[in-house]
Image (tube, helix red, strand yellow):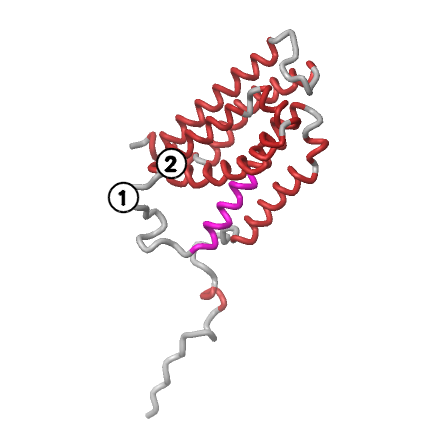
């Protein structure tokens, strides 16, 4: 009496076996992040004339685009690297950017500097300040992303709160000044820049809270 042979299990099995467990989507790869970085940099550089024609566009559109270009470039570089030997969360016992605090402090200082009206004026007339803007801001974006990866929720919340408070205060100063603070821009555009900074101080923490809702919830439930 012949016994039936066992059914082979392999590539000829059911198609559902080839699906990834959990059914989640794959995160964007280095190509997608690289394209995003080049798009931000291309917009900031290619539309340089219209973006610097108004103070509000200069401060609230071009400068963030340059920082985002560096942020996305760091993400592309990170996505293209193999995971560390100790796992995704592994890091050395000591580093120059421990917990992301030095990097976040640097980015906060640079952000505060670009809220000064004189910096915007000099970026239009002094090639050295312009070079610092077009080279330094992408570098700051790179440092920002690398620092956020190392920082915990408390550190992120501390620096985000300080930046948003500073943005709101500067925006109110712009609105309260009866004279224009930038030689290259008009009073009305200065008022719009102030409104934009106040709006940024409201929108930025809201977006961060939505993105970090699960880590914040875990921290509060400890």
Magenta region = 68-81
Name the foreground residue: 20 vs 91.
Answer: 91
Residue 98's x, y, as percent? 33, 37
- Residue 190 shown left or right of residue 139 in the figure: right
- Whether 77 is among the magenta residues is yes
Q: Could you tell me what secondary structure mostly forms the magenta stretch?
A: helix
Task: Return the residue at label 1.
Answer: 93
Image quarter of residue 196? top right
Task: Give whichever of discs 2 and 1 has the lower sequence position.
Answer: 1
Side (left or right) of 123 relative to 152: right
154 vs 135, nearest the viewer: 135
Callout 2 touching callout 1 (CB < 8 Å): no
Above/below status of 83 relative to 96:
below
Residue at the spot 40% in from the left edge and 31% down from the top edge? 156
Which residue shows up at 46% across the image and 72% down it? 13
Residue farthest to the bottom, as pictured: 1
Q: Secondary structure at mark 1?
A: loop
Quadrant in which residue 126 is drawn: top right
Q: Residue drawn 42% across and 74% down?
A: 10
**Quarter in which the C terminus is drawn:** top left
Q: Quadrant of residue 69?
A: top right
Q: Secondary structure at mark 2?
A: helix
Q: Residue at x 56, y 20 (%)?
A: 116
Which residue is the site of mark 2? 100
Please determine whether, in this image, residue 14 is positioned above or below residue 55: below
């Amino acid at each position: 009496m012949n016994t039936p042979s066992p059914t082979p299990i392999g590539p000829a099995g059911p198609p559902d076996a080839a699906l990834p467990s959990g059914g989640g989507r794959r995160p964007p790869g280095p190509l997608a992040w690289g394209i995003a970085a080049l798009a931000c940099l291309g917009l900031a550089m290619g539309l340089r004339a219209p973006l610097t024609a108004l103070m509000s566009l200069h401060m609230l559109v071009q400068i963030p685009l340059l920082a985002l270009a560096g942020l996305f470039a760091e993400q592309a570089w990170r996505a293209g690297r193999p995971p560390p030997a100790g796992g995704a969360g592994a890091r050395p016992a000591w580093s120059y950017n421990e917990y992301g605090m030095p990097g976040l402090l640097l980015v906060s200082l640079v952000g505060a500097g670009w809220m000064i009206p004189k910096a915007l004026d000099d970026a239009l007339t002094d090639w050295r300040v312009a070079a610092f803007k077009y080279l330094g801001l992408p570098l700051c974006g790179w440092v920002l992303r690398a620092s956020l990866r190392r920082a915990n929720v408390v550190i992120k919340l501390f620096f985000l709160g300080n930046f948003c408070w500073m943005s709101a205060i500067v925006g109110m100063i712009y609105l309260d000044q009866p004279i224009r603070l930038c030689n290259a821009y008009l009073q009305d555009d200065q008022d719009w820049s102030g409104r934009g900074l106040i709006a940024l101080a409201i929108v930025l923490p809201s977006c961060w809270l939505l993105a970090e809702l699960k880590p914040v919830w875990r921290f509060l439930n400890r």
